[in-house]
Image (cartoon, rainbow, N blue to C red):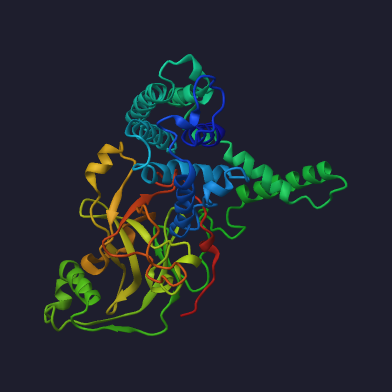
Amino acid sequence: MHLADLNWGDLLLSLWRGTIKGATKSDPKDAPYAVLQGEVWSDHGKRVARARSHLPGFLDRVPRDVSENINSGFKAVEWHTYLYGYLVSMLRHILPRDAWQQLCKHVKGVRLMYQEEITNKDVVKAKVLLTESTVDFENVYYHRDPDLLHVVRPCVHSIWHAPDEIFTRGSLIGLTQHTMERFIGDLGGQIRQPSNPYANLAQRAVRRCRDNALRAMLPGIGGRSIDDTPALPRGSYDLGDNYALLCARDTKLTLLSPGSQDTQAFYNYLSSSQPASIVSYTPANFSIMVRKWSRLRLPVEQVARSAWKECRIPLSNIRIARCVKIAIDGGYRMGEVRYFVLTLGNTIRPVALVSLFGPCDHELYVDSHETIERHAYQGEAELRVVDVKSIKLVVAMIPDEEEPPEEDPLTDYQHFHVGRHYVVLEKLRIQLGVQGHDPEMDIHDDSE
């Protein structure tokens, strides 16, 4: 937590802003990498703040305008998303190329180490990347100048040793301070006796331990089932394998008329999965009645939403959670969920209508050391109906833009715009099964 987030974040920004102290023969603001100054720094902070609406709610506290809040209690979780989610894409046209390449290697190495299960191959790859990152850091920022020795702080070499510790200590996320810091903060927030806070805190901790012991002995209590999965809210439909459709749902069937893009997507799906059901139809005369659902619970305890409901809310008031990672065509694609459907005709067949993003910009992906997955939004150009169990994760799609968008966020109900590019951001630790509770799991909503 402190090493990867706070220490590295403070070091890099002090270098890029030209505020690091210690040199006697040069001004840090004149360094070629001190690019975040003046209007550039202010515009960068505004871009960070604009990305807020594109982060799902389970991504904890989102980074605020870094140019205004860097010295105002910028939290560790904000540093984490900012450093390992935003920076490589937001600074690729601002930082000198050698500094940007060093940043990419560092980010990729840390991302590999944040996995719950890490293979020998990934440990070796992380070690190679962090070794190169450490050498590049010294070449870019220090270049063996005694007057700049102060920029090589202990965190520069400490992170380099992290892959070696995996062999003796296991996955490093099991050693993170986030859990302990959260526990301390949680107990501190429960203090109700200021006159004797430490005794009150001790009793709160004892009560928490008793509660945890009961939950361990009786997994079915506390709103969770016997197999330790969350109890489903009212109006939901259990699909098995820890998937479930959640309300809201349509109160009536909706007719998809012949010739529409949605109808064509359902025709293509049925022609490959249930050809006998449409043998008497052609794409020109095929229509179908569907009842829409708005949300889907995933096995990793994330909730995917849909454009059907989200597009009723302006961009300024939303945390978008309808972009998903889908196992399809022998690989993975990113898609925007339009809505979910439980039954096709008289058959229970849970599916989702999704708008697939374009393929990943492979050249940029390789050049950034696999840290930037950039996709174009295609709208209705590639609508596809997919089985809901092919949806694996909810992801954030961050706008890849230099200037503020033309649309007013107060009146932008579309959120994504055809032809523009977006960068994938996944919550670290989720992709390999470490679960994080999504607050939407607890919403009881059976309205239309």
**Is 356 above or below relative to 30?**
below
**Is 433 above or below relative to 404?**
above
Q: Is residue 277 visible?
A: yes
State the residue at coordinates (41%, 70%): 412
State the residue at coordinates (73%, 44%): 205
State the residue at coordinates (61%, 52%): 218
Left/right placement of residue 313 relative to residue 271 reads right
Q: Quadrant of the N terminus?
A: top right
Left/right placement of residue 264 relative to residue 42 reads left
Residue 405 image position (x, y, % from top left): 38, 61
Residue farthest along the right direction in this orientation: 195
**Is 120 above or below relative to 251?**
above
Q: Is residue 165 visible?
A: no
Residue 266 image position (x, y, % from top left): 22, 73
- Residue 239 or residue 171, whichever sits in front: 171
Q: Find residue 114 and report its image quarter.
A: top left
Residue 242 image position (x, y, % from top left): 42, 58
- Residue 429 or residue 155, whichever sits in front: 155
Residue 326 image position (x, y, % from top left): 30, 56
Q: How many marks?
A: 0
- Residue 80 or residue 429, whichever sits in front: 80
- Residue 215 or residue 77, whichever sits in front: 77
